[in-house]
Amino acid sequence: MSAKFPTRKPVDFVVIGSGAAGGVMARELTAAGLDVVLLEQGPHRTRADFKHDELAYFFNNELLGGAGNVQTFRHTAAEVAVRKSDPPPAMYARTVGGSSVHFSANFWRFRPVDFKERSKLGAIAGTGFEDWPISYEELEPYYTKVDWEIGVSGAPGPFDPPRSKAYPLPPMPVKSSGVLFEAGAKKLGLHPQVAPVAVLSQAYNGRPGCIHCGFCMGFGCEVGAKSSTLATMIPQALASGRCELRANCAAMRIETDAHGRVSEVVYRDAKGRTQAQRAKAVVLCANGAETPRLLLMSASTRFPNGLANGSGRVGHYLMNNSDSATHALFDEPLNDYKSVQASRILHDFYDSDPKRGFYGGGAIDARSFLGATPMMFALTTVPPDVPQWGAEYKQYLAHGFTRNMTSLGLGTSLALETNNITLDPTHKDSLGRPAIRVTYRDHDDDLKLQRFLQDHAVEILEAAGAKKVWREPVHPGTGGPHLLGTCRMGDDPQASVVDRYHRTHEVRNLFICDGSSFVTSGRGQPTMTIQALAFRAAEHIAAFAKKGEI
């Protein structure tokens, strides 16, 4: 049963954010015998609350916080940021379980090269391209723990990194898009493979297998087959009797004492009242946009540039992962709207190759994408030669919905100090907090990579027998769901925010673990690495607590 802790007595840990990292952190710290208050600014939805409602989720942004989640965007600091809400530039779910509730659940490990790529390739002028302070080999046991603790379905591919244990669950059934993609790729001498997903292909640990409803990307799972922290970690943390979940409670500020140590977290509760939970330590897991916002909002006389921001790096080096979309129509029905998004991927272009003339690497997958649901299909998956009104448009919708698929190119994003999260000086959200201001422009190499992967996606789809293939234009993006790098990890306190154990360099009892800890972006699917980092960090943080080193 859930615990209940008084606000004026210091609890062992306050964990801020209940998503991919925060849910793991709460489960692991409570399993180590430590008391946790878990703060989440969104509501505690259950399986019964999720619905197949495109209007609510894609247009009214119900899972993203709706109109109250005020954000602004600009490409460069020379511009005045303007409000952007459809969708917001920093896309994340405000709900217990965070974005692990509505993500597509594509679940790749990083590879050894992702952690030490600067050493392999050298510096890239004008960027924050650096090695991680940890290696794949150091993180591998925690990747395996993610596989088995939350439930991942898959099978090894020809280029996968070494693993210490097999997948716990067999792959999801291959979709029509996967069959066609695999056939086209093999014709070209490429090496398609099973797409691993954090969705149960069969019953596991008391949860049912996927029912293949198709409402996956952007939706919560009504049967609990998607391995969100809502379905996996958080129930176990609550069952320990050492975790109190406070939903609809938004952190407003982290206070420090006369010694510069974290002392309490000020938050707005579900009734709009200001509360403050005292804590022996705080773990900030709010995501790569909310985490830097809270640190910047927690500026004080001792920390004038924001809490734990002596390096000036808080909020900087935002990475979104580059992506490009290529659509195809086939003569026969695919019915690809069913089941998970992707069942096949291709990693032949994972490594960066100087012969291409630019930095970057990534993957190509086969998926239903936005064509999986009727309204989004009608608005986003229409060939450029088809009118978007009238009889011909209606004929296309009736014919094309069951016959379309998309290949996404998913790849690296270079870390740039000019890409950042800051506090908007004018706009405020519904709680009076400064709006998240996103400043972002893709590095030219990221755009070149998108076009490169798109070129190969076109070749694969044409080899697969597509009747029609068309590309989404490649141009500098205006946001995304992968919010990485804004409180980067490193050994040098002057160049990073947290150390290799996720402890902030300046505040001994403040830890940060979420996508903001990343040093490089990886190749397009960061959530598994976020969770592996959280399992590793929780192990070290619990050990520090037991030894009195916090």
Image (cartoon, helix red, strand yellow):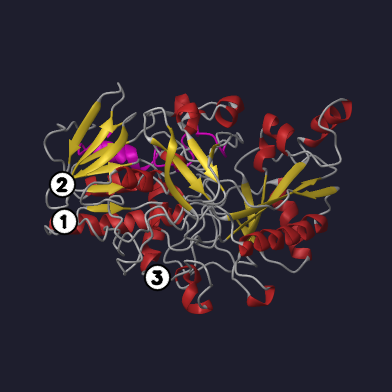
User: In terms of secondary structure, where does tag 3 sit?
Assistant: loop
User: In terms of secondary structure, where does tag 1 sit?
Assistant: loop
Question: Residue 86 appears at what percent x and percent y?
Answer: 58, 34
Q: Is residue 211 above or below residue 420?
A: above
Residue depicted at x 73% and y 38%: 335
Question: Residue 61 appears at what percent x and percent y?
Answer: 53, 30
User: In terms of secondary structure, where does tag 2 sit?
Assistant: loop
Res. 188 image quadrant = bottom right
Dots 1 and 2: beta carbons under 8 Å?
Answer: yes
The front one of 182 and 536 is 536
Instruction: In the rendered structure, find residue 550 and report the number of the disc placed on it.
Output: 1
**The N terminus - image quarter:** top left
Question: Residue 494 appears at what percent x and percent y?
Answer: 32, 66
Counting every numbered tag in the picture gives 3
Question: In the picture provided, is 13 more to the left or to the right than 188?
Answer: left
Instruction: In the rendered structure, find residue 280 and report the number of the disc placed on it.
Output: 2
Instruction: In the rendered structure, find residue 163 and report the number of the disc placed on it.
Output: none
Residue 378 visible in the picture: yes
Give the CA distance from mark 3 to mark 2. Answer: 30 Å
Q: Going from the N terminus, do you reach mark 1 or mark 2 first?
A: 2
Amino acid carrying label 3: it is Ser
Residue depicted at x 55% and y 36%: 84
The front one of 368 and 87 is 87
Q: Is residue 240 above or below residue 168?
A: above
- Report which residue position mark 3 lands on: 135
Residue depicted at x 49% and y 57%: 418
- Which contiguous range is marked in magenta? 216-245
Question: Residue 502 appears at what percent x and percent y?
Answer: 30, 58
